[in-house]
Image (cartoon, rainbow, N blue to C red):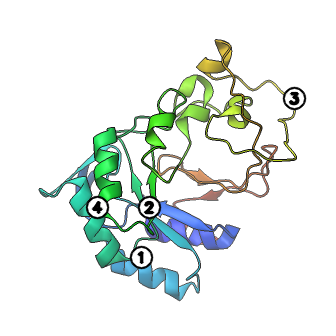
Amino acid sequence: WDSRIALAAAVATGASFIREVVTGVWESDMGLWTTDAAHTLRERRRLDAQDLAIFMNITPEFASPIGRRDAAETARSTVVSSLADAILVSGPMAGAGPSTSTLKGVRDAVPSDVPVLLNTGARADTIGEMLKIADGCIVGSSLKVDGHTWNPACRTCRHDHPTASADPTPQHPTSGSGGHCHGHRNGHRSSRRVARVVGIATTGMVPAVVALEASGVPLRRAILQNDARAT
């Protein structure tokens, strides 16, 4: 994860938010991981992007904190010290959610006007309980074939995910050879109406950012996350 590149990509594509690990020091699968919230906020100001929201991940996947504070304490502190626009709560890895007790502890710890979002593990079999606590969620792995992070997107489940909100003019995927998630191969479908895609989010595990329209067609070339020259 690199907040500078995330900010550059967001400004270049007209995104309304980024999600990033902005605070803390972590031991991780990627090695020792340090952050600099002040630098991130100054860079947002330098890019004249004060309206760009920064969703701060306070329990990043594939990592554990260097320190003794729990998730609730970290969330409360992050809102005060680093001016988080929203707090993200993750599980131990992509596709795996946090415990409901952790999520509730974070929600209880921060002011009610600061959104707390489920960052990983938004799955059909657990999302009902999670959304009784969280204000919203980021959906990724459960929209992939077989629910696996590295698989391509399921062309059916992205329109039938149970977190979708109703839309008066539903749009359906174009025909193609895309695969289906495990749930669709086993016959379950949501009774909710299809929601139009109105925004995108990318995980730090994906090496490119691609903006998509509701039908799934790329709107522009990918912006590589290791290229700070995004324009």
Q: Report the Cα–Cα distance between label 1 and label 2.
A: 10 Å
Considering depth in this image, is 121 or 231 the residue closer to the camera? 121
Q: Report the Cα–Cα distance between label 1 and label 3.
A: 41 Å
> Mark 3 = which residue?
175
Considering depth in this image, is 137 or 35 the residue closer to the camera? 137
The answer to whether residue 79 is above or below residue 30 is below
Quarter of image, res 192: top right
Considering depth in this image, is 162 or 159 the residue closer to the camera? 162
Classify mark 2: residues with Cα within 10 Å, few (<14), some (14-19) or many (20+).
many
**Disc on res. 6:** none
Of tags 4 and 2, the one toward the viewer is 4
Q: Report the Cα–Cα distance between label 1 and label 4.
A: 24 Å
> Mark 2 = which residue?
20
Residue depicted at 31% across the width and 67% down the height: 23
Earlier residue among tags 1 and 4 = 1
Q: Amino acid at mark 2?
A: Glu
Q: Amino acid at mark 3?
A: Ser
Dot 1 falls on a residue whose secondary structure is: helix
Judge left or right: residue 154 versus residue 214: left
Q: Report the Cα–Cα distance between label 4 and label 2.
A: 20 Å
Dot 2 falls on a residue whose secondary structure is: strand
Report if residue 228 is visible in the image: no
Dot 3 falls on a residue whose secondary structure is: loop
Judge left or right: residue 135 versus residue 189: left
Question: Residue 181 appears at what percent x and percent y?
Answer: 63, 23
